[in-house]
Amino acid sequence: MNTLLSIEKRNAVLNRMAELLEQERANIKSTNQQDMTNYSGEDLAMEKRLLVDDAKINGMILSMQQLASQEDPVGVERFHFVHDNGLKITNKTAAFGTIMIIYESRPDVTVEAGGIAFKSGNKILLKGGKESLLSNLKIVSLWHQALEEHNISTDWVKYLNYNRAETQAFLENPTQRVDLIVPRGGEQLIAFTKKHATCPVIVSGRGNNFVYISKDANLQKALDIIINGKTTNIGVCNALDKVLIDSNIENWEDFAAKLVDELQKYKVEILGDEQFSKATNIPQIESDLIWYEEFLNYKIVIGIVDSNDEAIAKINKYSGGHSASIITVNDEVAKKFMEQVDCAAVYQNASTRFTDGGQFGLGGELAISTDKLHQRGPIGLQHLVTNKWYIYGEGQVR
């Protein structure tokens, strides 16, 4: 078990990381450009996640500063009970120990997820993708500098430069203790991790998010929310993939035509179900299986439903359990939708793009969990802890 670093030391390292990221801004960007040049894939979403620009570095710095200013999540009392026999029983939050983060193409994860794991008292094992190796190694060197300057072992943040076979071997038979694994990436990465891991895994990252436009919707807001959800960042799990339109909207065909016009301005590939396709001359989907897909691209599927219940049922059948939004001015309708849709985050009149630890006031996130154990949705600092029972007696026996 790790000896827990004091909260003062943890905060000092995080504050120093913020300073080093600013000092090394130019070097981080130039190193990242080497990764960008070396990347030869056709995946536009992967390329967006791989790029480190000033905005991303600003985000990394802000996350370090926010984490350093937050309360210590370790040692928080959750429950207290005094037994009839005088035993004092307390439950407190505790660090997991060592957390392994496996991720693809996103150098900012090396900072932000690493920072959350570190602040919550854990050692970190980082296993990034080969496409972001140089950027990741550069950032890890800053972690090591910040640790060494505070007389802390660099073992607290380790980078595992493993290929797929080496990663599988480590997952199946770790050469050191690992208490929790967080895969951040596509479905293949998550399935690979779950298949081979020998310790708990937090499943994170699959989107396939829905917006439902009910008959009581403000249609201009609906349009703005769909454009925002689909086009601002295609490579993230909170992006929008599916739209359902209530056929009870007056002249829904006119709205459908306007929506197609707007999406085409952003060069979004649009597919529709039979009704939407007939109304707009948009290509029809070939199979209902497409409703299950997360696109991570300029692509959207739009369908028509005849009731709120049909929309809820369709979302519960096909969505990834991440985020869903209803556009309506009717709060009763929204309440039913939000209670019955089985997603980690449910919205009324807002874009799914807000499902994010930073946007939810958590000061960043380790992951966005679509599992129901032990935490659902953005996993922030306060969620990245387990718990432990402390019992104080004076010789009591049972």
Image (tube, rainbow, N blue to C red):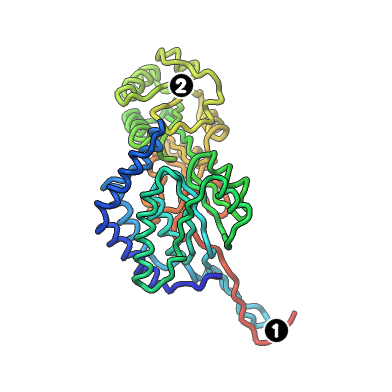
In this orientation, which residue lies closer to the viewer: 145 or 80? 145
Q: Residue at x 40, y 38 (%)?
A: 46
Q: Marks 2 and 1, how far apart in space?
A: 69 Å
**Whether residue 237 is situated above or below residue 123 in the rendered picture:** above
At label 1, which amino acid type do we have?
Answer: Gln
Count how many numbered circles sit on residues in the image.
2
State the residue position of label 2.
247
Question: Quadrant where the N terminus lies?
Answer: bottom right
Name the spot of residue 180 as percent of width and height, x first.
Answer: 56, 57
Q: Which mark is residue 89?
A: none
State the residue position of label 1.
396
In this orientation, which residue lies closer to the viewer: 22 or 375? 22
User: From the viewer's perspective, is 9 left or right of 199?
Assistant: left
Between discs 2 and 1, the one toward the N terminus? 2
Q: Secondary structure at mark 2?
A: loop
When asked about the image quadrant of residue 292, the answer is top right
Name the spot of residue 257 as percent of width and height, x first.
Answer: 35, 18
Name the spot of residue 205 as percent of width and height, x first.
Answer: 48, 43
**Whether residue 254 is situated above or below residue 170 in the rendered picture:** above
**Looking at the image, can residue 30 be seen?**
yes
Name the spot of residue 312 as percent of width and height, x first.
Answer: 53, 33
Q: Secondary structure at mark 1?
A: loop
Q: Residue at x 46, y 27 (%)?
A: 244
When asked about the image quadrant of residue 250, the answer is top left
In this orientation, which residue lies closer to the viewer: 48 or 210? 48
